[in-house]
Amino acid sequence: MGILDAIKGQLIDVIEWSDNSGKTMVHKYDMNGKEIMMGAQLTVRESQVAIFVNEGELADVFEPGRYELKTSNMPILTALKSWKYGFNSPFKSDVYFVNTKQFLDMKWGTSNPVMMRDAEFGMIRIRAFGIYSFRVSDPAKFLKEVFGTAALFTVEGVEGQIKRTLVSGLSDAIAESKIPALDLAANYEELSQYALQAINPKLADLGLTLCSFVIENISLPEDVEKSIDKRTSMGVLGNMDQYAKYQAAEAMRDAANNQNGVAGMGVGMGAGAAMGQMFAQSMNPAAPQAAVPAAPAAAAICAACGAQIPAGSKFCPECGAKQAATAFCTSCGKEIPAGTKFCPECGAKQ
Protein backbone atom coordinates (compact mmCIF):
# COMPACT_ATOMS: atom_id res chain seq x y z
CA MET A 1 0.00 0.00 0.00
CA GLY A 2 2.87 2.36 0.71
CA ILE A 3 4.20 1.96 -2.82
CA LEU A 4 0.74 2.54 -4.33
CA ASP A 5 0.24 5.66 -2.23
CA ALA A 6 3.62 6.97 -3.34
CA ILE A 7 2.71 6.39 -6.98
CA LYS A 8 -0.66 8.10 -6.56
CA GLY A 9 1.08 11.04 -4.94
CA GLN A 10 2.90 11.66 -8.20
CA LEU A 11 -0.34 11.79 -10.20
CA ILE A 12 -2.95 14.51 -10.61
CA ASP A 13 -6.53 13.33 -10.54
CA VAL A 14 -8.37 16.69 -10.18
CA ILE A 15 -7.66 19.79 -12.26
CA GLU A 16 -9.47 23.08 -11.55
CA TRP A 17 -8.81 26.77 -10.93
CA SER A 18 -10.55 29.60 -9.07
CA ASP A 19 -9.72 33.24 -9.74
CA ASN A 20 -9.55 35.27 -6.53
CA SER A 21 -7.90 38.38 -7.98
CA GLY A 22 -10.51 39.42 -10.54
CA LYS A 23 -7.73 40.68 -12.83
CA THR A 24 -6.14 37.42 -14.00
CA MET A 25 -6.64 36.65 -17.67
CA VAL A 26 -4.59 33.46 -18.02
CA HIS A 27 -3.40 31.05 -15.32
CA LYS A 28 -1.07 28.13 -15.91
CA TYR A 29 -2.03 25.17 -13.74
CA ASP A 30 0.88 24.22 -11.47
CA MET A 31 1.75 20.55 -12.14
CA ASN A 32 4.53 20.64 -9.55
CA GLY A 33 6.42 18.01 -11.51
CA LYS A 34 3.49 15.59 -11.50
CA GLU A 35 1.76 13.78 -14.34
CA ILE A 36 -1.92 13.78 -15.21
CA MET A 37 -3.76 10.56 -14.48
CA MET A 38 -5.78 9.18 -17.37
CA GLY A 39 -9.39 9.49 -16.22
CA ALA A 40 -8.62 12.58 -14.06
CA GLN A 41 -11.47 15.03 -13.42
CA LEU A 42 -11.23 18.41 -15.15
CA THR A 43 -13.57 21.15 -13.92
CA VAL A 44 -13.94 24.26 -16.09
CA ARG A 45 -16.10 26.91 -14.46
CA GLU A 46 -18.31 29.45 -16.19
CA SER A 47 -16.34 32.27 -17.84
CA GLN A 48 -13.35 29.93 -18.18
CA VAL A 49 -11.75 27.90 -20.94
CA ALA A 50 -9.10 25.19 -20.33
CA ILE A 51 -6.43 24.67 -22.99
CA PHE A 52 -4.03 21.72 -23.07
CA VAL A 53 -0.61 22.47 -24.56
CA ASN A 54 1.69 19.60 -25.55
CA GLU A 55 5.37 20.53 -25.79
CA GLY A 56 4.51 24.11 -26.70
CA GLU A 57 1.86 23.15 -29.26
CA LEU A 58 -1.80 23.99 -28.72
CA ALA A 59 -3.92 20.87 -28.30
CA ASP A 60 -7.45 20.42 -26.96
CA VAL A 61 -9.73 23.25 -25.74
CA PHE A 62 -12.39 22.59 -23.09
CA GLU A 63 -15.43 24.84 -22.61
CA PRO A 64 -17.19 25.22 -19.20
CA GLY A 65 -18.21 21.85 -17.76
CA ARG A 66 -16.90 18.77 -15.95
CA TYR A 67 -14.81 16.26 -17.89
CA GLU A 68 -13.22 12.88 -17.32
CA LEU A 69 -10.01 13.00 -19.28
CA LYS A 70 -9.63 10.16 -21.74
CA THR A 71 -8.54 9.66 -25.32
CA SER A 72 -12.06 10.13 -26.68
CA ASN A 73 -12.37 13.76 -25.49
CA MET A 74 -8.71 14.67 -26.16
CA PRO A 75 -8.43 13.89 -29.88
CA ILE A 76 -5.68 16.42 -30.68
CA LEU A 77 -3.55 15.45 -27.70
CA THR A 78 -4.08 11.77 -28.54
CA ALA A 79 -2.87 12.39 -32.09
CA LEU A 80 0.11 14.49 -30.98
CA LYS A 81 1.28 11.84 -28.53
CA SER A 82 0.45 8.97 -30.91
CA TRP A 83 -1.56 7.18 -28.26
CA LYS A 84 -3.05 3.89 -29.18
CA TYR A 85 -6.73 3.20 -28.60
CA GLY A 86 -7.43 2.53 -24.97
CA PHE A 87 -4.30 4.26 -23.67
CA ASN A 88 -4.48 4.36 -19.89
CA SER A 89 -1.10 5.54 -18.64
CA PRO A 90 -0.44 8.93 -16.96
CA PHE A 91 0.80 11.73 -19.24
CA LYS A 92 2.39 15.15 -19.11
CA SER A 93 0.82 18.29 -20.52
CA ASP A 94 0.59 21.99 -19.70
CA VAL A 95 -2.89 23.19 -18.78
CA TYR A 96 -3.86 26.87 -19.11
CA PHE A 97 -7.06 28.35 -17.78
CA VAL A 98 -8.21 31.42 -19.77
CA ASN A 99 -10.61 33.84 -18.08
CA THR A 100 -13.34 34.79 -20.59
CA LYS A 101 -15.43 37.05 -18.32
CA GLN A 102 -15.85 40.78 -18.96
CA PHE A 103 -13.26 42.98 -17.31
CA LEU A 104 -15.27 46.03 -16.24
CA ASP A 105 -14.62 49.64 -15.27
CA MET A 106 -11.33 49.92 -17.14
CA LYS A 107 -10.30 53.56 -17.36
CA TRP A 108 -9.00 55.28 -20.48
CA GLY A 109 -7.94 58.83 -21.30
CA THR A 110 -5.93 60.88 -23.74
CA SER A 111 -2.39 61.27 -22.44
CA ASN A 112 -1.86 64.09 -24.97
CA PRO A 113 -4.44 66.41 -26.56
CA VAL A 114 -6.01 65.14 -29.78
CA MET A 115 -6.11 67.50 -32.75
CA MET A 116 -9.39 68.04 -34.58
CA ARG A 117 -10.54 70.45 -37.29
CA ASP A 118 -13.66 72.42 -36.44
CA ALA A 119 -15.61 74.51 -38.94
CA GLU A 120 -16.20 77.31 -36.41
CA PHE A 121 -13.03 77.37 -34.26
CA GLY A 122 -10.54 75.97 -36.76
CA MET A 123 -7.82 73.61 -35.47
CA ILE A 124 -8.35 72.84 -31.78
CA ARG A 125 -6.98 70.33 -29.27
CA ILE A 126 -9.35 68.24 -27.19
CA ARG A 127 -8.95 65.87 -24.26
CA ALA A 128 -11.25 62.99 -23.40
CA PHE A 129 -11.64 60.24 -20.82
CA GLY A 130 -14.06 57.46 -19.91
CA ILE A 131 -14.34 53.74 -19.18
CA TYR A 132 -14.49 50.54 -21.21
CA SER A 133 -14.90 46.79 -20.76
CA PHE A 134 -13.43 43.91 -22.73
CA ARG A 135 -13.13 40.12 -22.75
CA VAL A 136 -11.19 37.31 -24.39
CA SER A 137 -13.27 36.22 -27.37
CA ASP A 138 -10.84 33.71 -28.89
CA PRO A 139 -8.79 31.97 -26.15
CA ALA A 140 -6.65 29.98 -28.58
CA LYS A 141 -5.70 33.07 -30.60
CA PHE A 142 -5.10 35.10 -27.42
CA LEU A 143 -2.78 32.37 -26.14
CA LYS A 144 -0.83 32.33 -29.39
CA GLU A 145 -0.65 36.08 -30.06
CA VAL A 146 -0.41 37.61 -26.59
CA PHE A 147 0.09 35.27 -23.69
CA GLY A 148 2.91 33.01 -24.87
CA THR A 149 4.29 30.66 -22.21
CA ALA A 150 4.17 32.79 -19.05
CA ALA A 151 2.75 31.26 -15.89
CA LEU A 152 0.41 34.21 -15.22
CA PHE A 153 -1.07 36.99 -17.30
CA THR A 154 -3.19 39.88 -15.95
CA VAL A 155 -5.11 42.77 -17.50
CA GLU A 156 -2.11 45.07 -17.04
CA GLY A 157 -0.44 43.14 -19.85
CA VAL A 158 -2.97 44.34 -22.46
CA GLU A 159 -4.28 47.52 -20.83
CA GLY A 160 -1.76 49.83 -22.48
CA GLN A 161 -2.33 48.32 -25.91
CA ILE A 162 -6.11 48.63 -25.62
CA LYS A 163 -5.97 52.24 -24.36
CA ARG A 164 -3.80 53.38 -27.25
CA THR A 165 -6.08 51.59 -29.70
CA LEU A 166 -9.08 53.29 -28.09
CA VAL A 167 -7.62 56.79 -28.34
CA SER A 168 -6.64 56.20 -31.96
CA GLY A 169 -10.11 54.88 -32.78
CA LEU A 170 -11.80 57.83 -31.03
CA SER A 171 -9.66 60.32 -32.94
CA ASP A 172 -10.68 58.70 -36.22
CA ALA A 173 -14.33 58.64 -35.13
CA ILE A 174 -14.36 62.38 -34.29
CA ALA A 175 -12.58 63.28 -37.53
CA GLU A 176 -14.86 61.19 -39.74
CA SER A 177 -18.10 62.16 -37.97
CA LYS A 178 -17.37 65.91 -38.55
CA ILE A 179 -19.41 66.82 -35.48
CA PRO A 180 -18.87 70.50 -34.47
CA ALA A 181 -17.00 71.06 -31.21
CA LEU A 182 -20.08 72.68 -29.65
CA ASP A 183 -22.15 69.54 -30.38
CA LEU A 184 -19.71 66.88 -29.15
CA ALA A 185 -21.35 66.62 -25.72
CA ALA A 186 -24.70 65.80 -27.35
CA ASN A 187 -23.20 62.97 -29.40
CA TYR A 188 -21.23 60.89 -26.87
CA GLU A 189 -23.35 57.80 -27.52
CA GLU A 190 -23.01 58.05 -31.32
CA LEU A 191 -19.24 58.55 -31.02
CA SER A 192 -18.96 55.55 -28.68
CA GLN A 193 -20.77 53.27 -31.12
CA TYR A 194 -18.74 54.58 -34.02
CA ALA A 195 -15.50 53.98 -32.12
CA LEU A 196 -16.57 50.45 -31.16
CA GLN A 197 -17.03 49.55 -34.81
CA ALA A 198 -13.61 50.98 -35.68
CA ILE A 199 -11.70 49.46 -32.74
CA ASN A 200 -13.04 45.88 -32.54
CA PRO A 201 -11.50 44.69 -35.84
CA LYS A 202 -8.08 45.74 -34.52
CA LEU A 203 -8.54 43.89 -31.22
CA ALA A 204 -9.93 40.78 -32.93
CA ASP A 205 -6.41 40.01 -34.18
CA LEU A 206 -5.39 39.61 -30.53
CA GLY A 207 -8.35 37.41 -29.63
CA LEU A 208 -10.04 40.26 -27.70
CA THR A 209 -13.40 42.00 -28.00
CA LEU A 210 -14.33 45.46 -26.74
CA CYS A 211 -17.72 44.99 -25.04
CA SER A 212 -18.45 48.62 -24.15
CA PHE A 213 -16.85 51.99 -24.68
CA VAL A 214 -18.13 54.98 -22.69
CA ILE A 215 -17.10 58.61 -23.20
CA GLU A 216 -17.53 60.45 -19.90
CA ASN A 217 -16.21 63.83 -21.00
CA ILE A 218 -14.58 65.63 -23.91
CA SER A 219 -12.96 68.87 -22.78
CA LEU A 220 -12.13 71.76 -25.08
CA PRO A 221 -9.20 74.20 -24.76
CA GLU A 222 -9.58 76.97 -22.20
CA ASP A 223 -9.83 79.72 -24.85
CA VAL A 224 -12.61 77.86 -26.66
CA GLU A 225 -14.48 77.28 -23.40
CA LYS A 226 -14.26 81.00 -22.56
CA SER A 227 -15.63 81.86 -26.00
CA ILE A 228 -18.50 79.43 -25.48
CA ASP A 229 -19.21 80.95 -22.04
CA LYS A 230 -19.39 84.42 -23.59
CA ARG A 231 -21.82 83.27 -26.23
CA THR A 232 -23.92 81.56 -23.59
CA SER A 233 -23.99 84.76 -21.53
CA MET A 234 -25.06 86.77 -24.56
CA GLY A 235 -27.86 84.31 -25.22
CA VAL A 236 -29.05 84.57 -21.61
CA LEU A 237 -28.93 88.38 -21.62
CA GLY A 238 -31.03 88.60 -24.76
CA ASN A 239 -31.40 92.29 -25.77
CA MET A 240 -27.86 93.67 -25.64
CA ASP A 241 -29.06 97.28 -26.00
CA GLN A 242 -31.17 97.00 -22.87
CA TYR A 243 -28.30 95.30 -21.06
CA ALA A 244 -25.89 98.10 -22.01
CA LYS A 245 -28.34 100.67 -20.65
CA TYR A 246 -28.70 98.70 -17.46
CA GLN A 247 -24.93 98.54 -17.04
CA ALA A 248 -24.64 102.29 -17.59
CA ALA A 249 -27.37 102.88 -15.01
CA GLU A 250 -25.52 100.71 -12.52
CA ALA A 251 -22.33 102.70 -13.10
CA MET A 252 -24.21 105.95 -12.58
CA ARG A 253 -25.72 104.67 -9.36
CA ASP A 254 -22.26 103.76 -8.07
CA ALA A 255 -21.04 107.25 -8.99
CA ALA A 256 -24.01 108.82 -7.24
CA ASN A 257 -23.23 106.84 -4.09
CA ASN A 258 -19.67 108.15 -4.04
CA GLN A 259 -19.25 110.33 -0.93
CA ASN A 260 -16.24 112.38 -2.08
CA GLY A 261 -17.41 115.90 -1.25
CA VAL A 262 -18.77 118.44 -3.71
CA ALA A 263 -17.37 116.64 -6.73
CA GLY A 264 -19.23 113.51 -5.68
CA MET A 265 -22.42 115.52 -5.22
CA GLY A 266 -22.08 116.98 -8.72
CA VAL A 267 -21.47 113.60 -10.24
CA GLY A 268 -24.40 112.18 -8.33
CA MET A 269 -26.76 114.93 -9.54
CA GLY A 270 -25.62 114.55 -13.14
CA ALA A 271 -25.85 110.79 -12.91
CA GLY A 272 -29.34 110.96 -11.47
CA ALA A 273 -30.57 113.24 -14.26
CA ALA A 274 -28.96 111.10 -16.97
CA MET A 275 -30.25 107.91 -15.40
CA GLY A 276 -33.79 109.22 -15.26
CA GLN A 277 -33.68 110.26 -18.91
CA MET A 278 -32.17 106.93 -19.94
CA PHE A 279 -34.76 104.86 -18.08
CA ALA A 280 -37.53 106.96 -19.59
CA GLN A 281 -36.14 106.26 -23.05
CA SER A 282 -35.65 102.56 -22.34
CA MET A 283 -39.21 102.20 -21.01
CA ASN A 284 -40.68 103.89 -24.09
CA PRO A 285 -38.05 103.65 -26.83
CA ALA A 286 -40.59 103.95 -29.64
CA ALA A 287 -42.09 107.26 -28.44
CA PRO A 288 -41.73 109.90 -31.19
CA GLN A 289 -39.92 113.07 -30.29
CA ALA A 290 -41.90 116.34 -30.29
CA ALA A 291 -41.87 118.01 -33.69
CA VAL A 292 -40.35 121.48 -33.83
CA PRO A 293 -42.93 123.91 -35.30
CA ALA A 294 -41.83 125.45 -38.54
CA ALA A 295 -41.17 129.23 -38.49
CA PRO A 296 -43.98 131.22 -40.10
CA ALA A 297 -43.22 132.58 -43.52
CA ALA A 298 -42.38 136.35 -43.64
CA ALA A 299 -45.31 138.61 -44.72
CA ALA A 300 -45.75 142.18 -46.14
CA ILE A 301 -48.59 144.79 -46.48
CA CYS A 302 -49.99 145.90 -49.86
CA ALA A 303 -49.38 149.66 -50.26
CA ALA A 304 -52.67 150.06 -52.22
CA CYS A 305 -55.32 147.99 -50.39
CA GLY A 306 -53.53 147.21 -47.10
CA ALA A 307 -53.97 143.42 -47.47
CA GLN A 308 -51.30 141.08 -46.02
CA ILE A 309 -49.33 139.55 -48.84
CA PRO A 310 -46.24 137.21 -48.98
CA ALA A 311 -42.98 139.02 -48.61
CA GLY A 312 -41.27 139.70 -51.92
CA SER A 313 -44.54 139.73 -53.98
CA LYS A 314 -44.30 141.94 -57.07
CA PHE A 315 -48.12 142.31 -57.33
CA CYS A 316 -50.87 142.22 -54.67
CA PRO A 317 -52.95 139.03 -55.03
CA GLU A 318 -55.98 140.97 -53.72
CA CYS A 319 -55.98 144.17 -55.80
CA GLY A 320 -53.24 143.52 -58.36
CA ALA A 321 -51.35 146.68 -57.46
CA LYS A 322 -47.63 146.65 -58.22
CA GLN A 323 -45.52 146.49 -55.09
CA ALA A 324 -42.31 148.32 -54.35
CA ALA A 325 -39.19 146.17 -54.26
CA THR A 326 -38.49 145.43 -50.58
CA ALA A 327 -36.51 142.94 -48.46
CA PHE A 328 -36.12 141.92 -44.84
CA CYS A 329 -33.11 142.15 -42.53
CA THR A 330 -31.41 138.82 -42.11
CA SER A 331 -30.72 139.65 -38.46
CA CYS A 332 -33.69 141.49 -36.95
CA GLY A 333 -36.30 140.74 -39.65
CA LYS A 334 -37.28 144.35 -40.24
CA GLU A 335 -38.48 145.38 -43.75
CA ILE A 336 -35.80 147.29 -45.60
CA PRO A 337 -35.49 148.59 -49.19
CA ALA A 338 -34.20 146.05 -51.68
CA GLY A 339 -30.46 146.30 -52.32
CA THR A 340 -29.67 147.74 -48.87
CA LYS A 341 -26.17 146.71 -47.77
CA PHE A 342 -26.69 147.39 -44.05
CA CYS A 343 -29.91 147.29 -41.99
CA PRO A 344 -30.90 150.83 -40.88
CA GLU A 345 -32.39 149.32 -37.66
CA CYS A 346 -29.66 146.98 -36.35
CA GLY A 347 -26.76 147.73 -38.68
CA ALA A 348 -26.32 144.08 -39.65
CA LYS A 349 -24.62 143.47 -43.02
CA GLN A 350 -27.03 142.08 -45.59
Image (cartoon, helix red, strand yellow):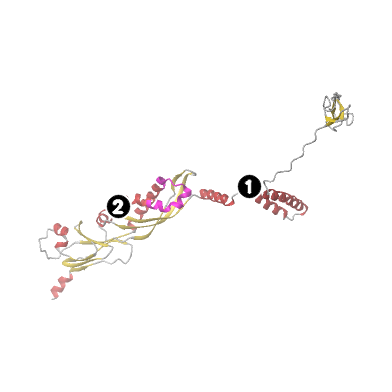
Residue 190 inside the magenta-drawn segment: yes
Estimate the x, y position of residue 16 in percent, counting from the top left. Answer: 24, 67
* Residues at marks 2 and 1, CA–CA distance in whole angstroms: 60 Å
- In this rendering, is residue 333 above or below 49? above
- In this rendering, is residue 186 above or below 323? below
Estimate the x, y position of residue 31 in percent, counting from the top left. Answer: 21, 65
Residue 348 versus residue 83: which sits nearer the camera?
A: 348
- In this rendering, is residue 151 above or below 313? below
Q: Dot 1: few (<14), some (14–19), or many (≥20) neighbours within 10 Å? A: few
* Pointer 2 residue: 204
Residue 101 versus residue 191: which sits nearer the camera?
A: 191
The C terminus sits in image quarter: top right
Instruction: Determine the residue positioned at 59% across, 51% down.
Output: 237
Instruction: Tell me the number on the disc at residue 25.
Output: none
Q: Quadrant of residue 217?
A: bottom left
The residue sitting at the front extreme is 319
Estimate the x, y position of residue 22 in percent, counting from the top left. Answer: 33, 64
Instruction: Determine the residue positioned at 54% across, 48% down.
Output: 227
Residue 56 versus residue 341: which sits nearer the camera?
A: 341
Q: In which quarter of the image is residue 5?
A: bottom left
* Pointer 1 residue: 241
Q: Callout 2: helix, strand or loop?
A: helix
| Amino acid residing under circle 2 | Ala
Instruction: Determine the residue positioned at 31% across, 58% down.
Output: 135
Q: Callout 1: helix, strand or loop?
A: helix
What stretch of residues is rendered in magenta? 174-193
Q: Dot 2: few (<14), some (14–19), or many (≥20) neighbours within 10 Å? A: some
Estimate the x, y position of residue 30 in percent, counting from the top left. Answer: 24, 65
Magenta span main SS: helix
The N terminus sits in image quarter: bottom left
* Label 2 or label 1, whichever comes before in sequence order: 2
| Amino acid residing under circle 1 | Asp
